[in-house]
Amino acid sequence: MPGPRGRGRGGFSRGGGGGAGRGRGGGAGRGRGGARGRGGARGRGQRSAATHYDNRPAKRTFDDIPKDKAPISDDEESAASESESEAESDDDEPEGPTTKPYNALLQSLKESKINHEPKNKRRKVDVITEKEEESDFDEEEAAEGEAEPEEDEDEAVEEDEDEEDENPTDPFEQHFGSPSAEYLKRIDTAKKGEFTNNKLILPGIGRAVQSTPAGAEPVSTRKFDSIKSLNLKQRLATPFEELNGELTPLQKSFSPYIFSYQDVQFAGRTVSNADELRRMYCIHALNHVFKTRDRVLKDNDKLKHGNDDLELRDQGFTRPKVLMILPTRNSCVKAVDTLVALAAVEQQENKKRFTDGYAIPEDQERISDSKPEDFKELFSGNHDDLFRVGVKFTRKTMKFFSQFYNSDIILASPLGLRMAIGDEGDKKRDFDFLSSIELVIMDQADAILQQNWDHVMHVFNHLNLIPKDSHGCDFGRVRSWYLDANARYLRQTLVFSAHGSPELNSLFSQHMLNISGRLKTQPQYDGVINDIGGLKLLQIFTRFNAANPMAEPDARFKFFRTAFVPTIQRNVSQGATGILVFVSSYFDFVRVRNFFDGLDLSFGAISEETPVPDVARARSHFLSGRFPVLLYTGRAHHFRRYEIRGVKEVYCYSLPENQAFYKEIVGGFLTRSVGEGRVEGGRCKARVLFSKWDAMKLERVVGTERVRVMCNEVGDTFEFTN
């Protein structure tokens, strides 16, 4: 099995010196010393003048079977590769137990004096300073260390904002600000996982299921027909209207759930609706941060001018409140640009440093216009998948690369967070900065599924835990559900994906347990088997049986070996060429490749790990017929989108997660061969192997109406001719 920190792009280079930049625009490594597990590289040397924009994967150095894969170049024939040095923890603090939270909190209270009086120190920021942007430490260093002293808080609560906070019908007040005792009783039901489901039809979205804790009335989901109905801070409403315009139909459908702090899992994200979704979750995140911050400042003022014995529960253990999990640095740039436009702050600290490290010049964009739109959206710009950055807001300033414990919003990739958190057995780990996260947003979850899902689960398993250290916390101000270790049941989680998956279903059932409720969309699909370029094609779907998901890989391999391989061998012995075997999983690919090695059969193999020269050779030999069979992985197609020539027949060992891949491989490859005169249209054929555990992938390919029959019918072979 691969190590938990595997990225799919080069191993860990232990020792001194910075590694080459990861992805396009990563920049050369800076300084001496290895990278640290929590906060990235600690080297102090200057950044290399040369910036590398090549994004080929480096050779594996630590495992034969990688589990995740970083995005790579769309330029198929580039021979460059990059070497990387990864983080190695050099900390030496032993991990302490996290049990008995009350005892730990009481001990911390005894050890530290609590000062309710806010600091008066202020500083003025007249211009966007560039000094820190030229600093000589790595960007991820901001993740480490304790919180800085609060010194920059031009922090007075304006009168109009004070009035905003008094609205008892505001969902923020009902869920976080001043939830009723009756409302908080839902926690006990949520702990048991007892939810009542209600099927819905949402305008412009379709089928959905809303779940609320059993016995509880659904949270009011009044219609949101205008921006005014969103309960936004006044300072946010105007910028949002200028950027977004009136609410779109999609935003109107989701706003009742998102702005009432319910969990949402949307399986219909597309390139065309990505911007309106991003604007919606960014304004929600800012609204939550500003309302939380202003509530704390208002209570500070009460304590300063009133009775110190007032009990004001208005915060968590640590400052960070919003976590955005994104697949690439470019997706981070898009989110940050949206936050900047909506926050409308007067100053931005370290913005140039952020732009230099996360964006690339437009004239250095290398993706071909012929690539699909979803590929260009994901892999344009700097698509490095190792990053994390804290963002801090004051009334006039937005600061990038703030210390995590001083940040309001953390934007990071799953791998970046995994490196910050550390693993079991590390001498020192740090995940206290996740203890008080109240809003998690994961965008492009379908792309994150192609990286390493273990990193995502590692992050969610470390959310909302009782912190090991106090980090200067005023426990007299901490809300009761934090002290009771129940914060995860009030945390809102928003997940946006192009499609569903078993992994997302598991995340929904295990980690999206919001007492306000939760919503999961269930799209209906027409299927793509009749949308493959007008080619007349026989498509044969064969079902095999597997008792459970754990037994499925062995059952699939056995069926393929006994039912499909003899046919392939017979056809090759009769002179057939152009046989493409598509394998979605890399682990299955390794198994099939090793099996083919033992056969008297010439074949090529292309995976996301295959060196570029070997890819070119395999494609050339397959086109010429020297390799009658070519093995091709789903992840190779995801990261490269090769256009394989010479395909005459397709065998799908397993279905792709993305139904567009089926169109491109079965329809696109075969259509090209017909157009080039390599095969007659009527002789093209595709054979697909599936089990009932593939129902979600199968549904997207054959359509919602067909999938139930195909998974439950007595027969096991289904033929389609378009």
Image (cartoon, helix red, strand yellow):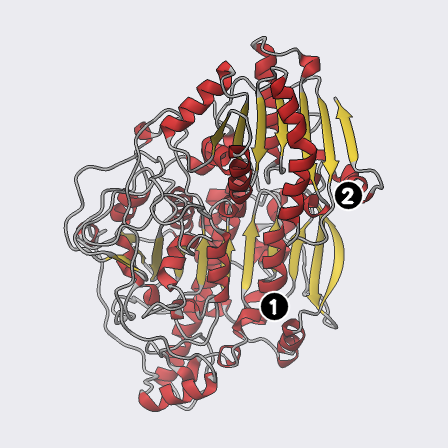
Q: Residues within 10 Å of mark 1 (few under 14, many from 20)?
A: few
Q: Foreground residue, 601 or 282?
A: 601
Residue furthest top in the image: 677
Q: Foreground residue, 674 or 327?
A: 674
Counting residues from the N terminus, which is met first, the one under dot 2 or under dot 1? Answer: 1
Whether 574 is drawn above or below 439: the answer is above
At 48% from the left and 70% from the top, the residue drawn is 464
Q: Give the structural element (helix, strand or loop) at label 2.
A: helix
Residue furthest left in the image: 45
Q: Foreground residue, 268 or 617?
A: 617
Residue 556: x and y in percent read 66, 43
Q: Is residue 225 visible?
A: no
At 35% from the left and 39% from the top, the residue drawn is 382
Q: Tell me the mark number nearer the camera, choosing from 2 and 1.
A: 2
Q: In the rendered image, which quarter is residue 491 located in?
A: bottom right
Q: In the rendered image, which quarter is residue 562 located in?
A: top right
Decide if residue 655 is on the left or right side of residue 112.
Answer: right
- Identified by mark 2, the residue type is Cys
The C terminus - image quarter:
top right
Whether 655 is drawn above or below 66: the answer is above
At 63% from the left and 66% from the top, the residue drawn is 516
Decide if residue 446 is on the left or right side of residue 719.
Answer: left
Whether 599 is drawn above or below 512: the answer is above
Question: Which residue lies under the disc numbered 2?
Answer: 711
Question: Which residue lies under the disc numbered 1?
Answer: 169
- The reply to whether callout 2 and callout 1 are in contact (CB within 8 Å) is no
Decide if residue 349 is on the left or right side of residue 67.
Answer: left
Residue 543: x and y in percent read 74, 39
Q: Residues within 10 Å of mark 2 (few under 14, many from 20)?
A: many
Q: Give the structural element (helix, strand or loop) at label 1.
A: loop
